[in-house]
Every structure is written in C-alpha cells, then in structure tokens.
Image (cartoon, grey):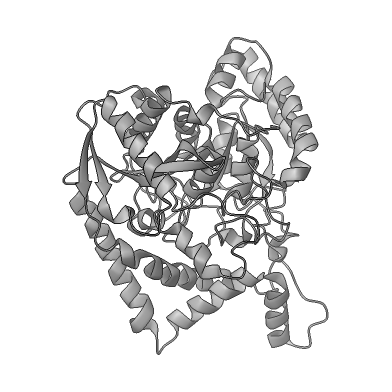
C-alpha cells in the first residue's frame, strides 16, 4: 500500500480494494517504524487521522467521490491546525496550539484528506538543509548522511521514504523545489496568490507560497486542486478561476517552445547536473518541444536582492514573537526590556537571529535606500527579464540546484555557501512565477532535479510538461534503499 501514488490510492478507494482506515493504519505503523531514523515528523496525529479516515469511508459509502477523499497526507508545521501544535520548527512556538485551521488545511480537510501529522522544517522556514529545526535535522532517505533540502525537508523526506503519498509544503526561495530535487520528488511552487497564505505562519510575506510535494506531476495536480483558490481572508490571494489541473496533463507537447537560459550554465553548476539537464531537454525534444537559448541577464543580482528583501520582511513578521502574547517566554524577567531580549534570544535559533539582524539593518533609517530600496528595484529587473523571455518561449527549463545534496553539517560554518544553493530557485519567488522541480537522474547515487518555470497562473502547463516527461522516463519511480 505504501508504494501507491495519490492517483492510485484514489482508484483503489473508489474500487473498494481497501478502506481509508486500513490505509491510514498501515501508514501510521510505517511512520512509527521508520521515522526515528529520518526525523521527518514533529507531531503525529493518530487519533485525528483515524477519525478523519472513518469519516471519509462513511462519505464514500454514501456515494460521495473525490480524488482526495480518504487520501492520507501531512502538513508542513507552519500551517496552523486547530488544537494541534504548530511549532514552525522553533522553540519559540514549541507550546503553541493554533486556535484555527489555515485555509489550506481547512480546504483539504473539506475535500476529505486524512492528516497523519505535522512535518519537520527549518526554523521559521529559514534554511536550505533542514538543519536549523529546534527538533533536530531531517535526514535524506537516499543517504542518511546527507541533507534532504529545506525548508520543507520533513515533508520531502516523508514522501520520498514512502511514509505517505504527498504532503503540503511552502516555498519562499525554493523550499518546495530544492527538497524535491534532493529527494527525487515532484514539487510545485504555484503563482504568488494562487494558494491562500491565511494561517500559514509568515517568513517573508511577499515571497511565501504554499504548494504540493508528491512523487508525480499527476499527484501534484490532484493536491494543488484541493489547495488552490481565492480566499477573502488573504489580501494577497488572487481571484482567478482554478482550472482542472488533471484534465490538462495529457496535452501534446508538439510545438511547445522551451527556453534554456545561457546564464544557468556557469562555473557554479556541477557539470554532471548540466549533463542531466541536457538529457532532459533531448527527451522533451523527442516529444515535440522546440528548444531555444534565451538570456536572463539580471539573474546574477537575484541572490543579494533576495537576501535583503527576505530578511527585511522576516524582521518585521517575527517582531510579534516577543514573549508577551503567545509562544516562548523567558523565566523571571526583570522588566519588559529583559522579557523581550531573553524571550527572543532564547526562543529563536542562530539562523533566525542572523536573518532578523540582517533585515533590521537593511530597514534602518540610514540604509533603507542603499539596501532595501535597491533590492526592490533589482526585483523589478528580474521580473522584466522573465516577461521578455516569455514573449519568446512558453516555459523555461534549467537545473533546480547547482549541486546534489551535501552532507549534514558540511555548510553549517558558512551560511553564504548554503545561500548560494538557491541561485536557480529564488528568481521565481522574486517575480511571483510558478515553478516546478521534477526528477531527472542521479549523481553519485543522489537525486537531481530539473526545474520548469512558466508565466503567471500556468501551473497546468508545468504539470502537463512534467507528466509527459514522466510518462517517458522512470526517474520518479526509483525508491531509496531500505524504504
């Protein structure tokens, strides 16, 4: 059962080959057995899962159908879940039980999904390795000595290890696509505003976006269908009709124009990954796609712009965690200032403190124009590059990451080296574009992903290309040894 995709589970439930309750019990037992070596979950919700599974089976018995009805999933632990700990991977929120469900959680629950638990993550979604969590690092099921990517590494590791078929995740600078690449999954960051951020604890509000992590493009289409849609509670949610993503999966790629940016193939890219990217291009050419070299000239400025904008927004968003209203509170504060200082100093980890300080500095009176304002201008240039490119091509293809997953602890002493691993993913967040990573091969036994980018609200096109690619390759079917 644990090897089934979401699509296969939907067919099995519809054909009454098994019940949602039976499937849920199998997966909960598998998590109990295997997750201690991965550390992919922060909280398990066995009672909730079994009650939701029974309810889903009852709905099916009455004749109700739906691809997600009875499907087991997990939520990244920054989606608020009523009455359940929502920690954001931080000591600051270790004791926080959300009083309401995030819109994504509520929508998926209404569709009949079964919540197995909350997955581990980099603290407040800040990281590319899932090593900054208060609950310890997550291990990559393909090699327990390597990182699974971040910040959605818990969701990625759990799905890759076949502990569950799919999970929710979020992407601020690549935190869905990079873990997908490192763990041989398909991960989709939707257009900014496509999925509600209400109840999703914020890191950088103009960059954060929720999306699905699963083994196939078909499964991502199913999960995104349940997540997407306008939400009046979210002022950044866009009132745009949600198409049937599954219906467009089988469209022909004949004549599809794919752009490959020349800037992607610089000295920083592992040549073995470059070769796998070129192999993917050839595979799509066989399916009728037309390949064209393009240029994204301002890509080189994206990382410095991102690492000004994101910390600036984080310093503002995280100011609410002050030891007064909720979350961690220091022992015996001498006065209000001592309460603030010690609660934040003890409650936040090193990476979060680093980004808050960088952001506060960039927003300070003497440096706002020199750093934050300039970074926003670069953001516009990055967006303009994409708009010009999409006048020539339908999608853009390139590597998801410059290197395969690195060993645990290898970049801990050099945060900038870790930041540089986001070079191919952050541009989509700066521009608000949808992006997808799909499995494309292996380097030294570790998975490698290829990234697809598309114009706004063209998630269906990305899923179509990835699905057709997966019908003609078998990278996504490979399973890590021991799982």
* Extreme residue toward the left, this view: 392
Location of residue 49 in the rendering, given as x and y in whole percent from the top left corner? 72, 33
Which residue is at a point 32% across and 65% down the rendered structure image? Answer: 300
Q: Is residue 204 left or right of residue 89?
A: left
The C terminus lies in quadrant = top right
Depth check: give the residue in front, 412 or 426: 412
Residue 45 visible (yes or no): no
Vertical position of residue 307 compared to residue 163: above or below:
below
Location of residue 38 in the rendering, given as x and y in whole percent from the top left corner? 71, 45
Location of residue 470 in the rendering, given as x and y in whole percent from the top left corner? 42, 27
Residue 174 visible (yes or no): yes
Location of residue 427 in the rendering, given as x and y in whole percent from the top left corner? 36, 57
Vertical position of residue 194 compared to residue 463: above or below:
below
How many marks do you count on the picture? 0
Give the image quarter of residue 33.
top right
Q: Is residue 381 left or right of residue 352?
A: left
Depth check: give the residue in front, 80 or 381: 381
Give the image quarter of residue 344.
bottom right
Which residue is at a point 31% across and 76% down the rendered structure image? Answer: 374
Depth check: give the residue in front, 260 or 187: 260
* Extreme residue toward the right, this view: 332
Give the image quarter of residue 349.
bottom right
Which residue is at a point 32% across and 34% down the rendered structure image? Answer: 461
* Extreme residue toward the bottom, this view: 366
């Amino acid at each position: 059962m644990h090897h089934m995709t979401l699509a296969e589970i939907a067919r099995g439930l519809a054909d009454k080959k098994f019940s949602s309750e039976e499937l849920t019990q199998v997966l909960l037992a598998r998590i109990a057995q295997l997750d201690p070596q991965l550390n992919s979950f922060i909280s398990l919700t066995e009672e909730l899962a079994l009650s939701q599974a029974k309810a889903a089976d009852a709905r099916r018995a009455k004749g109700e159908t739906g691809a997600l009805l009875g499907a087991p999933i997990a939520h990244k632990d920054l989606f608020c879940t009523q009455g359940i700990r929502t920690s954001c991977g931080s000591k600051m929120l270790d004791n926080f039980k959300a009083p309401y469900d995030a819109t994504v959680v509520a929508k998926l629950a209404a569709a009949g999904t079964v919540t197995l638990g909350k997955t581990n993550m980099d603290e407040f979604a800040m990281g590319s390795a899932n090593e900054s969590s208060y609950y310890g690092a997550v291990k990559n099921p393909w090699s327990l000595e390597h990182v699974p990517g971040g910040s959605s590494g818990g969701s990625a590791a759990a799905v890759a290890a076949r502990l569950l078929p799919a999970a929710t995740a979020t992407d601020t600078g690549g935190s869905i696509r990079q873990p997908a690449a490192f763990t041989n999954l398909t991960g989709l960051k939707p257009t900014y505003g496509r999925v509600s951020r209400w109840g999703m604890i914020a890191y950088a509000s103009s960059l954060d976006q929720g999306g699905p992590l699963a083994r196939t493009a078909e499964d991502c289409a199913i999960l995104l269908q349940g997540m997407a849609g306008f939400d009046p509670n979210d002022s950044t949610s866009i009132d745009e009709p949600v198409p049937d993503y599954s219906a467009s999966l089988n469209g022909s790629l004949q004549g599809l124009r794919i752009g490959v940016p020349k800037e992607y193939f610089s000295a920083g890219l592992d040549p073995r990954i470059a070769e796998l990217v070129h192999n993917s291009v050839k595979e799509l050419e066989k399916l009728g796609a037309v390949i064209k070299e393009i240029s994204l000239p301002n890509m080189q400025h994206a990382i410095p712009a991102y690492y000004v904008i994101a910390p600036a927004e984080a310093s503002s968003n995280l100011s609410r965690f002050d030891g007064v209203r909720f979350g961690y509170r220091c022992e015996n504060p001498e006065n209000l200032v001592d309460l603030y200082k010690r609660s934040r100093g003890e409650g936040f980890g090193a990476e979060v403190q680093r980004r808050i300080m960088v952001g506060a500095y960039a927003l300070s009176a003497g440096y706002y124009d020199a750093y934050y304002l300039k970074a926003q201008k670069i953001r516009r240039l990055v967006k303009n590059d994409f708009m010009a490119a999409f006048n020539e091509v339908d999608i853009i293809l390139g590597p998801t990451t410059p290197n395969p997953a690195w060993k645990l602890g290898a970049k801990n002493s050099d945060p900038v080296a870790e930041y540089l691993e986001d070079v191919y993913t952050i541009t989509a967040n700066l521009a608000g574009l949808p992006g997808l990573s799909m499995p494309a091969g292996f380097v030294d036994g570790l998975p490698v992903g290829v990234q697809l980018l598309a114009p706004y609200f063209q998630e269906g096109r990305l899923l179509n290309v990835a699905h057709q690619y997966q019908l003609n390759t078998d990278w996504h079917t490979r399973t890590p040894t021991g799982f």
